[in-house]
Amino acid sequence: MSENCAVPLCLPNNSKWDEQTGEYSRDEDQDRTSLYVIDAALERLRNVKGPVCVVSIAGPCRKGKSYILSKVFDQGEVFPLGHELDPETMGIWMWIVPEKFQDSSGQEFTVVLLDSEGIDAVSGEGSDDHCIFTLTILLASVLIYNSAGVPTRTDLDGLEYIMKLSQRIQIHSGGQTAGAVEGSADDQKIFHKTFPSFVWLLRDVVLALPKGCHNIKDYFLTRVFKTSSGSKTDKAKMVAESILSYFPGFDAFKLPPPSSDPDVVLNLNRDEVQDDINKSFLRGVDELKSSLRSKLAPKHSFNEGEFVTGEALATMVTSYVTALNTPGTVPNVQNAWDVFVSTKCTQAKAAATESYDKTMDSEMSGKLPCERDDVRKAQLTALDMALKLFEEETFGISSSNIEKYLNDLTAYMENGLNCWQERNTRLTKESCHQLLLGLKRQHLDPVLTQLRGKDGAQMSFAEIMACYSSIEQGFKSEAIGAEDVCAQVFLDFHPELQAEMEKHMEHLQQLKDFDENLAYEKEAKAQELEQRKRVEEEKARLEEERRMKEREMELLKAKQEEEKRRLEEQMRSAMEAQREQMQNMMRANMDELQRERQHVADQNKTMKDAMEGMQRSLNERNGQITNLQRQIQEIANRPPPPPPARKKKRCVVM
Ligand SMILES: Nc1nc2c(ncn2[C@@H]2O[C@H](COP(=O)(O)OP(=O)(O)OP(=O)(O)O)[C@@H](O)[C@H]2O)c(=O)[nH]1
Ligand SMILES: [Mg+2]
């Protein structure tokens, strides 16, 4: 299919168009019962961004509609022309003018040309539903009604289908039809907002205007549309009133015949006949061109301040064709627009939320956990892009119509922000916990290993406290994510760490106590040994002393025995000597004997005293020996000295 050719926008059900070849064909055997929309045309329309101005042409068959529509927009032969008597164009064909236009306010828009089949083409097939004509009016911004010659009032009778528009179009969803020609001024306003301006183009006009008519429009208004008839059934009058009531603007234009030569007329688009075309015709075309250009403006929707975009037009076509195909239903302008608004806003919202999600995903990719402000910045970027997209996509739709969707979108994005913040909070928590575990591993574990080791008690409490400080400092410098969450995690972790630290401190305290007890026991044992040694020594000393005393006692006993023996010997010798002396005295002198006897008695007494003294001494010594034995016994029975009293130290962790 050539890109330089028009495409059908909708076709009768008995017609076919091949998108690949651009070939059009008609099944003569099939009855025409409905219309269908061509997707390729809708696709082209949807690609038109911004507002459109639709220029449609309608009118009887074979009157040069296709030719003039492309000619006045300098588009070459985009619409196929028929050179036979049979109608050429069926359905509605569409061509989008590549050139961009601007209205007086600078608003850019795209002109869409709609070439429709001849009004009487369908009648020729036995149908009078005029669906195509109705559709053409509904879609157009400017309607060119093309007919040959200057119509008379009688000709107006044949335009009854314009009157019938009242039954074929519904303006409001409430059920009001466009029919009330006699309706209120308000109704008229609504029709004017919805209907295109009407340009009646007269072809092959050779006759001059009557006197008093400045132009053909004057002629229409003063001669054709003017009626003196008071009859309410005057069709011509009703058609004229319908045209002036429904359409917001009326204009008329006439063109002379392009040539008197049939060959030229039949081949108007061929290069070789261009010089043979009547100059007056070409001048007329130029005048029509500029006149039409002045009428071009973005198509307004049913609602105030809303523009119809290419996409909106595509939706409206579909809605209108569906209604036209449904028996008992007529196209409803408000419904069609509402369908578009709701479809478009729903799509725009979906596109905007998708854009938001994508932007957030890419903005936050690899950044979580992060500071809350980073999430907010990403949110602003995503929100900005999403809103911009939503705005672009809903171009032409009034703010009151998009409000609900915009609120939904805003709520979605607010919820999105909350979700991202929650996700950031969760990841911040996880990251902080991991960091704390790592810091504990790094700073506390080596100390704990040492604490559990054999020299655990050698550790100081300060070393454990230093671990806590290192963990805290490490956390403060390395923690990433939402600051408040980081602070909260540390705050939550603090008592846990504190409890753990205290547990370790307590353990250390126990170790230290144990170590102190051990030292004390060692000392006590040493003291006990010392004491025992002292006792042994004392015992040995006392034993020695006892032995010495015993030896001394033995010596005393021996000496006493010796003394006793000596005294007994001395006593026996003295007794012997006394007995001898006595015998001598008895023999010599009794007196002398007596003195002698006295002397011996004295001596005996002295001896006896000495013996008694010796006996006392012996008794005294025996008492000493008994005392010594008692002492020895006491020494042997003496208990070991008691161990010294212990003292405990405690360290309190603050
Ligand atoms: N007499 C006359 N013929 C014209 C004029 N403009 C075009 N033609 C010729 O009329 C024939 C039909 O032209 P189209 O443009 O196909 O006419 P149409 O109204 O689109 O025809 P349908 O689509 O069949 O209704 C062609 O041979 C044209 O060259 C004109 O102003 N006057
Ligand atoms: Mg045509």
Image (cartoon, rainbow, N blue to C red):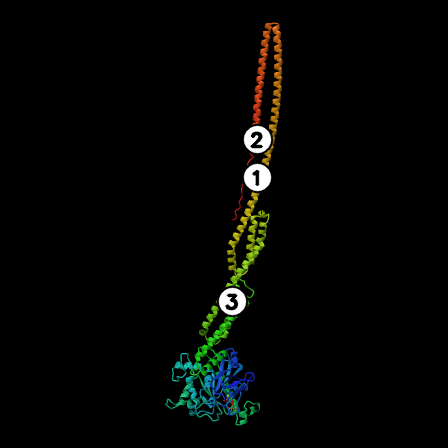
Which residue is nearer to you in this view: 579 or 253? Answer: 579
Horizontally, is 413 left or right of 232 in the view?
right
Badges 2 and 3: C-beta atoms under 8 Å apart? no
Q: Earlier in the sequence, mark 1 or mark 3?
A: 3
For mark 3, what is the residue? Answer: 379
Above or below for 507 versus 379: above
Disc 1 residue lies near ligand 2 with CB under 8 A: no
Give the alpha-carbon distance from disc 1 to disc 3, as whole Å.
76 Å
Of the 4 image quadrants, the one containing the N terminus is bottom right
Q: Residue 373's spot in the image, x, y percent?
A: 52, 63
For mark 2, what is the residue? Answer: 635
Query: Which residue is at the far bottom?
Result: 261
Q: Is residue 201 visible?
A: no
Res. 524 mark? 1
The kind of secondary structure element at disc 2 is: helix
Disc 1 or disc 2, which is closer to the eye?
2
| Residue type at numbered disc 2 | Ile
Badges 1 and 2: C-beta atoms under 8 Å apart? no
Q: Earlier in the sequence, mark 1 or mark 2?
A: 1
Residue drawn at the location 53% of the way across and 69% of the way down: 359
Above or below for 208 versus 425: below
